[in-house]
Image (tube, rainbow, N blue to C red):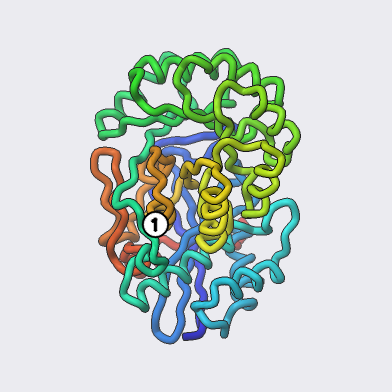
């Protein structure tokens, strides 16, 4: 079964509410949220994957993802066996090589995930059975608080609780330090003492500012301080981890399993964030998670405001490694997935790992084509 077709579709998905990180806007209410869906075919079988272009978070755009796949990644793997995921990863590295990052991780992830979906569909089994690894049937989802002032937090927390969410993640680095701390304090007050709570700075702070913030938040029951410093500030993260009263979690710093190995050797990480798209897909993400387990590093889970294809891919990964802490898979909170028929079931803030073949998401290709945008045509 050899890969014979790869198609990309940039689609505009309805946005439910606005969402921002320290780098800028991720979703804007009233504007479509663009995602790039990828269909990979092999001998009559097919699978789907997704890339989430967020220039406020990383350098890849909808335009760059489409051209990277169409002009570089697809030609590098057409004709290869669909099952040769290791060979595909090597071919990707030759087509778009690594710098400090792994090189176009979102584009690579979309194709890698589509290949996993294809293989699971061809075998008639969900990914966990394909891997021989599924430790959980459900995953608890956290509710995201982003951009609100301290006075506005009550409404956001109440909305999340009304939908069944019991855990909360707060985006910080969007205000000055005092306001950031006040927002977290307000979330703790309204969520209650027993609610799991963690914060994510998305690289917003310097080492000194991050340590000040960690000390401000100490005593609020914050479970993790996610990516407080720039991804490549390895020495700063090591020093912060030594001094912080709150566990330091790494996200943007971990583009490849070898990055985690570096932080482990330097004693610069408490928690590793598993994130499918950041790490170039499920193949490398499984390697990173396995290394974290073997090295005794705690795993938490996160996504990139994915639609339902990305949501399903993450759920299969997290279930395989038994990630039991609440995760940040916030796509349903901010965008809709009108292309998805039978798909991921979420009830009372808990996602059920799909049981259908492959990812377990049925894609209506007619709807995908109706939503498609020509992102390469300039005005």
Callout count = 1
Q: Residue at x 73, y 31 (%)?
A: 236
Residue 1 location, x and y as percent? 46, 85
Q: Residue at x 36, y 31 (%)?
A: 167
Within 10 Å of disc 1 (Cα), the crowding (few <14, some 14-19, many 20+) is: many
Q: Is residue 271 left or right of residue 307?
A: right
Q: Quadrant of the C terminus?
A: bottom right
Q: Is residue 319 left or right of residue 278?
A: left
Residue 268 location, x and y as percent? 67, 36
Above or below, comparing residue 212 to residue 280 in the picture: above
| Depth check, front residue: 168 or 335 | 168
Which element type, helix, strand or loop, lies under badge 1? helix
Q: Which residue is mark 1?
A: 316
Query: Could you tell me if residue 375 is visible in this image?
Result: no
Above or below, comparing residue 189 to residue 129 in the picture: above
Q: Is residue 309 left or right of residue 230?
A: left
Above or below, comparing residue 104 to residue 238 in the picture: below
Q: Quadrant of residue 123?
A: bottom left
Residue 60 location, x and y as percent? 62, 53
Residue 149 location, x and y as percent? 47, 18
Q: Is residue 62 left or right of residue 145?
A: right
| Depth check, front residue: 248 or 75 | 248
Query: Could you tell me if residue 141 is visible in this image?
Result: yes
Q: Residue at x 33, y 51 (%)?
A: 136
């Amino acid at each position: 079964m050899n890969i014979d077709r790869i198609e990309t579709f940039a689609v505009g998905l309805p946005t439910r509410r606005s969402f921002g990180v320290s780098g800028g806007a991720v979703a804007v209410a009233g504007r479509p949220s663009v995602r790039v869906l990828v269909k990979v075919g092999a001998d009559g079988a097919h699978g789907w994957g997704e890339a989430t272009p967020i220039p406020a978070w990383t350098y890849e755009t909808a335009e760059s993802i489409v051209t990277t796949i169409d002009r570089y990644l697809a030609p590098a793997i057409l004709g290869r066996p669909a099952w040769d995921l290791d060979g595909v990863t090597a071919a990707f590295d030759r087509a778009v090589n690594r710098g400090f990052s792994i090189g176009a991780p979102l584009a690579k992830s979309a194709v890698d995930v589509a290949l996993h979906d294809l293989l699971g569909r061809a075998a008639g089994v969900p990914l966990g059975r394909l891997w021989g690894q599924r430790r959980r049937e459900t995953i608890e989802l956290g509710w995201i608080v982003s951009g609100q002032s301290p006075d506005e937090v009550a409404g956001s927390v109440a909305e999340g609780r009304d939908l069944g969410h019991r855990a909360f993640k707060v985006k910080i680095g969007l205000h000055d330090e005092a306001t950031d701390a006040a927002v977290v304090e307000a979330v703790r007050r309204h969520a209650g003492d027993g609610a799991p709570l963690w914060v994510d700075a998305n690289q917003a702070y310097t080492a000194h500012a991050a340590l000040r913030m960690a000390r401000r938040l100490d005593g609020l029951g914050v479970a993790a301080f996610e990516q407080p410093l720039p991804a490549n500030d390895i020495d700063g993260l090591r020093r912060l981890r030594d001094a912080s009263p709150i566990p330091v979690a790494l996200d943007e710093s971990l583009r490849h399993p070898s990055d985690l190995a570096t932080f482990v050797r330097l004693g610069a990480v408490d928690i590793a964030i598993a994130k499918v798209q950041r790490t170039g897909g499920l193949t490398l993400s499984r390697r990173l998670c396995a290394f974290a387990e073997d090295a005794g590093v705690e795993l938490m889970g996160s996504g990139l405001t994915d639609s339902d294809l990305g949501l399903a891919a993450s759920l299969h990964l997290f279930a395989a490694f038994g990630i039991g802490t609440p995760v940040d898979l916030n796509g349903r909170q901010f965008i809709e997935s009108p292309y998805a028929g039978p798909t991921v079931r979420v009830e009372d803030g808990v996602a059920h790992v799909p049981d259908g073949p492959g990812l377990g998401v049925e894609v209506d290709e007619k709807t995908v084509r109706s939503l498609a945008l020509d992102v390469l045509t300039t005005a």
